[in-house]
Image (spheres, rainbow, N blue to C red):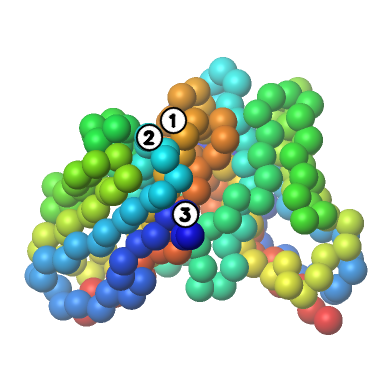
Amino acid sequence: DTAVSQTPKYLVTQMGNDKSIKCEQNLGHDTMYWYKQDSKKFLKIMFSYNNKELIINETVPNRFSPKSPDKAHLNLHINSLELGDSAVYFCASSRSGREGQYFGPGTRLLVL
Amino acid sequence: GNSVTQMEGPVTLSEEAFLTINCTYTATGYPSLFWYVQYPGEGLQLLLKATKADDKGSNKGFEATYRKETTSFHLEKGSVQVSDSAVYFCALTGSGNTPLVFGKGTRLSVIA
C-alpha cells in the first residue's frame, strides 16, 4: 500500500543516453511534483502538475520532459543525459498545500 | 520570493541531549510551514506541520511553533535518540498547491 512509488530506485547510465523515471501515487491527490536533490542535499522544484496539466516549469532544460497520462501518474523523461544530471529525483503529491506533500523514495541517477 | 534559512550542520549530540534546529523564513502572505526528515538512503518524510501563526506541530517527540512575529519555526526535541540521526529540512508553501521551498537541510548525528 505504498503511497507514492517511483521506479527505478537506481539508474546508472552513460552520457548522451535517454532515460525515463516513473512515478505513481495512490492517495487520490490532484497535484504532483518533481524535485531534484543535488549532491549537497539541496532540494529544488522542477515541475508541478495539477490534474494532468503542467502548472510550473522552473527553468529546467528542455531535455527534461514530464508527462502525466492521468492524475495518478507523473513520469519524467530525460534526453541526452549530462554529467550534471546526476542527482536524486523525487516525485511528490499533495491534495492541498496546507496538508503537506508526500514524497516517493527517490531515484538515484548517476551519469558516467 | 519565498525563502527558508536553517542552521548549517552538521549537529552532533549525545543520546538524551536536547535538540534545537533553527529555521527562519521570508514569505508573502501566510505560508504553511513544515519539517521533513530524510533518513540515510531514503526519501523525505513529513515530520510535522503548522498552518497558521501560533500553531504548534508535533510528532514523535519533535515539536515546532509557528512564530509570525519572528518569522521562525524552530524544531525541538527534549531527548534525542540514535535513531533520530538524519537530515532535517524546514520548508514552506504559499497558497494553493504551490511547490515547497526548502532550507538547505541540517544533518543530525546522535551518538550513544
Q: Amino acid at mark 3?
A: Ala
Say if A84 sits above or below B90 in the image. Answer: below
User: Residue B97 shows which numbered tag?
Assistant: 1
- The crowd level at tag 2 (other Cα within 10 Å; few <14, some 14-19, many 20+) is some
Q: Residue at x 34, y 53 (%)?
A: A24
Foreground label between 1 and 2: 2
> Mark 1, chain letter?
B
Between tags 3 and 1, which lies in front?
Answer: 3
Badge 3 and badge 1 both on one subunit:
no
Q: Disc 3 versus disc 1: distance between alpha carbons?
A: 18 Å
Q: Nearer the viewer, residue B61 or B80?
A: B61
Query: Is disc 1 surrounded by few (<14), some (14 to 19) or many (20+) residues within 10 Å?
Result: many
Q: Earlier in the sequence, mark 3 or mark 2?
A: 3
Q: Secondary structure at mark 1?
A: loop
Residue with the mark numbered 2: A30
Q: Which mark is residue A62?
A: none
Disc on res. A3: 3
Residue B74 position within the rendered picture, expressed as x and y whole percent measured from the top left: 75, 43
Quadrant where the image shows the C terminus of chain B: bottom right
A112 vs A68, nearest the viewer: A68
